[in-house]
Amino acid sequence: MRRGDVGPTALSARAGLIALCVIAIACGEAGQPSRGGPTSSIPYAGTWRLTDGRGPDGEVPLGKGYRITLDISDRKAGGTAACNIYGGDLDINGDYFSLKGGLVMTEMACDPQAMDSEAAYVDALAAVDTIAWEGNSLTLTGPDAELHFEGLSPPPIAQLTDTIWRLDSLIEGTGPEGTAVSAAPARLILRGDGELSGSTGCREFEGEWLRRGDEILFTRFTTEGDCPPDLEEQDNYIVGVLGDGFTAEIEEQSLMVFGKAELGLHYVAESKR
């Protein structure tokens, strides 16, 4: 990963927070995070990422930086459809699989490529009626659709929570092509009771969080204070990454979080609370 300037696209990251609790699969008990793996009698319960697929109108395109996921629990399914979060009730019996009653979805707007991917996936998901799984692979099929998924691991909740994370840099892109730019002092704290707090470098924030699949979602997020012009871009960037749901990877004292469009944040553990 290279140190450099984060480009204009990255710094225009969306600062709004989704009203997540319109989707039952994403909310669970108010204010309480989900912990550990799925507790379900369904053998394929868990979180899956789409690797390829086709629907009634052809291939489901996979946009760079916009994942499509499927989170399955008892009689519920949901996930991220490239841009928006979706959820619905499952009708399952043996290898029969259907989202009865359709889907409930948030209504964000993303890049055209992500919206095209989302539309194709939602159409394909509505057309499947059969499920098959083996190990880390899951397939949904129907007369006009076939979707292939791979299993995802849950986030490292025990390592993530009750630690003061100090922001080190803003990240755009992943792997060797990714760039990182130093950030003004900021912090993030996710507590084990489902509360959160932190700062963006110019504003304090607090709220509540939970785990959905392999992501962390903020279900309540309020900020306090104003930002001087030189920190407004960093403030927007941080809220954009954290506010729409993010994945978290921890290696020793280093935390990497990534939101949509391969926009991320690098934190370093400061202390355990």
Image: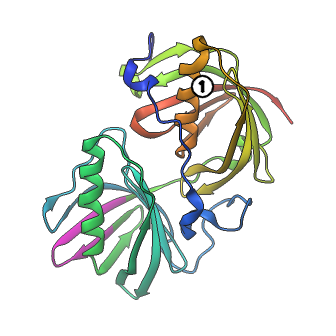
Query: Where is residue 196 drawn, in percent x and y?
Result: 75, 43
Which quarter of the figure is the N terminus placed in?
Answer: top left
**Residue drawn at (37%, 71%) of the image:** 133
Q: Which residue is mark 1?
A: 235
Query: Where is residue 121 drawn, in percent x and y?
Result: 28, 61
Query: Where is residue 82 drawn, in percent x and y?
Result: 36, 50
Range shown magenta: 139-149
Query: Which of the pair 228/241 is nearer the observer?
Result: 228
Which quarter of the figure is the C terminus placed in?
Answer: top right
**Residue drawn at (70%, 36%) of the image:** 223
Instruction: Check if residue 142 falls in the magenta segment.
Output: yes
- Magenta stretch prevailing secondary structure: strand
Quadrant of the rendered image containing residue 131: bottom left
Instruction: Check if residue 219 falls in the magenta segment.
Output: no
> Mark 1 packing: few (<14 Cα in 10 Å), some, or many (20+)?
many
**Residue drawn at (42%, 25%) of the image:** 10
Compared across the picture, whether 253 is left or right of 231 comes to: right
Question: Does 237 appear above or below 143?
Answer: above
Q: Give the number of callouts.
A: 1
Compared across the picture, whether 170 is left or right of 224 comes to: left
Farthest residue to the bottom: give it: 93
Quadrant of the rendered image containing residue 40: bottom right
Query: Which of the pair 218/230 is nearer the observer?
Result: 230
**Residue drawn at (36%, 20%) of the image:** 177
